Amino acid sequence: MSSQAGNSDTRLLEIVGDEISLIVDLEQGSRISSLTWRGLEFVVQPRPSLMDWGWYAMVPWAGRIKNGLIKDSSGREFTLPAGWEPPHAEHGYGFYSPWIKTGPASSRLEMPDPYCPAVAEQRFEVQGNSFRWTLEYAANGCEIPAWLGFHPWFLRELAIGDPAHVEFEAERMLVRGSDGIPTGEYSSPKPPPWDDAFTDFKKLPSITWPGAAKVDLISKSPWWVVYTEDQAGVCVEPQSAPPDAANLGISGDHHIELVLNFS
């Protein structure tokens, strides 16, 4: 691996490769606060809401959960925090919680109630023009459904080149209700702008900034959420299950990887 990792500041991870370098802010959700490739910055920088900048893990759920309500395997109902975008619970605990440094390029989060004693771990690796991001969740006896995702905020405009263009081919997307939550119905993909969950991919997503760069996104995740309604950034998010998955009767894996290939 052609990278060096480590920092005396326990609040940060700095990973430096030949082509790609990144900074991970452990205190603010173990989020990637900077990723540069050949000197170009790709990460939306801090904005008022922690949901709206950086690249972060979504754990122990990805996307919205309707009204913040979820049931465990025995049918007991739990109310999850819904303060970020009421009345729904957004993106899990990981994106706003401090994580613990476990190595020069890894971090760990112990889940609060009602998900305690579950834990999550992240790992970051750069090699040449590729970046690999790994997230794992261990339930440790917690019987509340969990599914995972990554939420990278890519800059819509880099320092050079034209604005970002997102390209992919999927067979189906979930229909969103007026509350922004999937209804459980499917349709053929609609034209952009998007804030939607897609599945059954024929071609995985890529983002091109003509005249500057291209990023191919590779993941085995069956679901991707694509968001293009923001002027500053675009989000292309692999998820092991879609938003509100548990209430839709959809389960998701507890392991997810995303590889970004830059060119």
Image: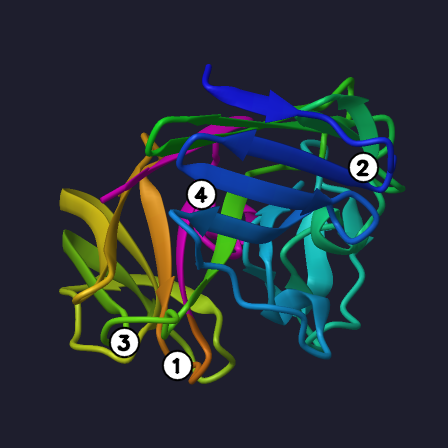
Q: Determine whether, in the image, residue 94 is placed left or right of residue 244.
A: right
Residue on which the image places disc 4: 241
Using the image as rendered, state which of residue 41 and residue 203 is in the foreground.
Answer: 41
Mark 4 or mark 1, which is nearer the start of the sequence? 1
Task: Tell me the amino acid under the disc marked 4.
Answer: Ala
Asked whether residue 240 is in view, the answer is no
Cα separation between marks 2 and 1: 32 Å
Q: Nearer the viewer, mark 1 or mark 4?
A: 1
Q: Residues within 10 Å of mark 3 (few under 14, many from 20)?
A: some
The residue pinned by badge 2 equals: 115
Residue type beneath disc 3: Pro
Q: Secondary structure at mark 4?
A: loop
Q: Quickly name the residue at label 3.
A: 163
The C terminus appears in which quarter of the rendering? top left
Q: Is residue 76 left or right of residue 217?
A: right
Q: Residues within 10 Å of mark 1 (few under 14, many from 20)?
A: few
Q: Amino acid at mark 2?
A: Tyr
